[in-house]
Amino acid sequence: MTLKLFTLLLEAALKTLGISLVSIAIGFVIAMLLSAAIQSGKSIYLLPARLFISFFRGVPLLVQLLLIYTLLPVIGINVPGIVAAIVGLSLCTAAYQAENLRGGFASVPRGLVEAADVAGFNGIQTFLRIRAPIALRLTFPALVNEAIMILKASSLVSVVGIIEITKMAQDLASSTYMPIPIFASAALIYFVINSAIALLGGYAEKSLKGASA
Amino acid sequence: MMFDPQVIIQKLPEIGSGLFVTLWLWVAGVLGGVVAGFIVATARRFGGFVVNTLLGAVVEVLRGTPFLIQIFLLYYGGPFVGLMLDPIPCGLIGLTVYSAAYYSEVFRAGYASVPHGHVEAAECLGMTRLQTIARIQIPEMALIVLPPAINLAIILLKESAVLSIITVPELTATVSAIGSQQYAFLEAIFVLAVTYWIIVELTDRLGRQAEKRLSRLRFSKA
């Protein structure tokens, strides 16, 4: 295990990090839309949102990625592999994040929502300014957990040929014939990134608590 | 490209055998993980500082790294340390170790949820530690532990699809192979997704039923 190999792994780790962060961000936006659909209480919005959440939480991510890879060209969309990978990860994490947010939305005090109504906020304003920020603050620890899950899950996009850290490790392991040090280094890099996310998340959580007090 | 169910119907026996491998790997992995996880959680609770710290570090590493990397280490790295494993035993060991790490955390929370006074009361009555665990701590934590344990089982079912990458002939591997042999990718992956979805939904329902039963049992005795 030379320094050069480790540097290659670190470079690939940047790609892993990039894919994960973008997917979490897009997933968050979709999760908010799903939450809005569920909050609306109208079955035209509610049922598709429920179906979406159930499907993406019920099917292995690997199968979702394969499905998106196969489906996109069939319906005439030709995108680079990395876009398909990000789409897959985003849709999956959106379903999980929406499920987390559901708990948060359920614990928004009714009085606050009523007060917003009385103050003349319309439904969208109440959602954006009252419900969503409170739900987000309440479910922040779950969001940090989800970020860690997605970082680990992003290893699966290696299967569809994206050269992130897992794929890089696989290629290096087969070309150098040293699987143990290389996969162990890859594991170490994942572990360090995840620990950093957990640590930063902990700090952010504390400062959020400070802000609400 | 037309959706042609004929391909799938012809290959039902093969799909069935893949499903069978997935199901038994899953059940064995979960059961093994529950037993090993409980032992780890118990050892961490009663084994003193050194045991707790060491096992805690192992659990953190297993939880902080992707399952795929762990499987690669075991499957490709194993032969270098004299551990030649076929795909299926390798998958089973990998799945069990991975699930044990997560289940140990579930049981750790379970132990923490049992009121200290109950354990002290058991000690005062002269129960041994094993008796206390079997008669007080396990029954009391059961209701707390069940929902996350079911959730974890569902996560592990989905994680088992990853084993297709090291050529374990489970559902994902079998069905995607059929897809590429028959040029019926979309049909194959559609069947795959729906099959997993059904198993997950069923497990979820079953889990909720079990939860209801358990809570009735518990409160009727109280």
Image (spheres, coloured by chain):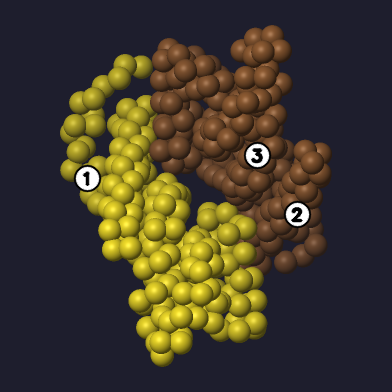
Q: Position of residue A92 (x, y in %)?
A: 53, 34
In the image, what residue occupies the spot 47% across and 18% down?
Answer: A41
Chain letter, colour yellow:
B
In the image, what residue occupies the spot 46% across and 86% down?
Answer: B123
Chain identifier of the residue bearing label 2 in the image: A
Instruction: Give the quarter of the image for residue B220.
Output: bottom left
Q: Residues within 10 Å of mark 2 (few under 14, many from 20)?
A: few
Q: Position of residue B122 (x, y in %)?
A: 43, 82
Q: Residue A26, can we see it?
A: no
| Left or right of B18 on screen, residue B75 | right
Name which residue type carries label 1: Gly
Chain identifier of the residue bearing label 1 in the image: B
Chain letter, colour brown:
A
Front position among marks 1 and 2: 2
Q: Residue B115, can we see it?
A: yes
Residues at badges 1 and 2 in contact (C-beta under 8 Å)? no
The image's mark for residue A138 is 3
Q: Which residue is mark 1?
A: B16
Q: Nearer the viewer, residue A145 or B175?
A: A145
Are tags 3 and 1 found on a single chain? no
In the image, what residue occupies the spot 39% across and 63% down?
Answer: B142
The quadrant of the picture occupied by the N terminus of chain B is top left
Q: CA distance from mark 3 to mark 2?
A: 18 Å
| Element type at mark 1 | helix
Chain identifier of the residue bearing label 3 in the image: A
In the image, what residue occupies the spot 26% across and 22% down?
Answer: B4
Residues at badges 3 and 2 in contact (C-beta under 8 Å)? no
Name which residue type carries label 3: Leu
| On screen, residue B127 above or below A28 | below
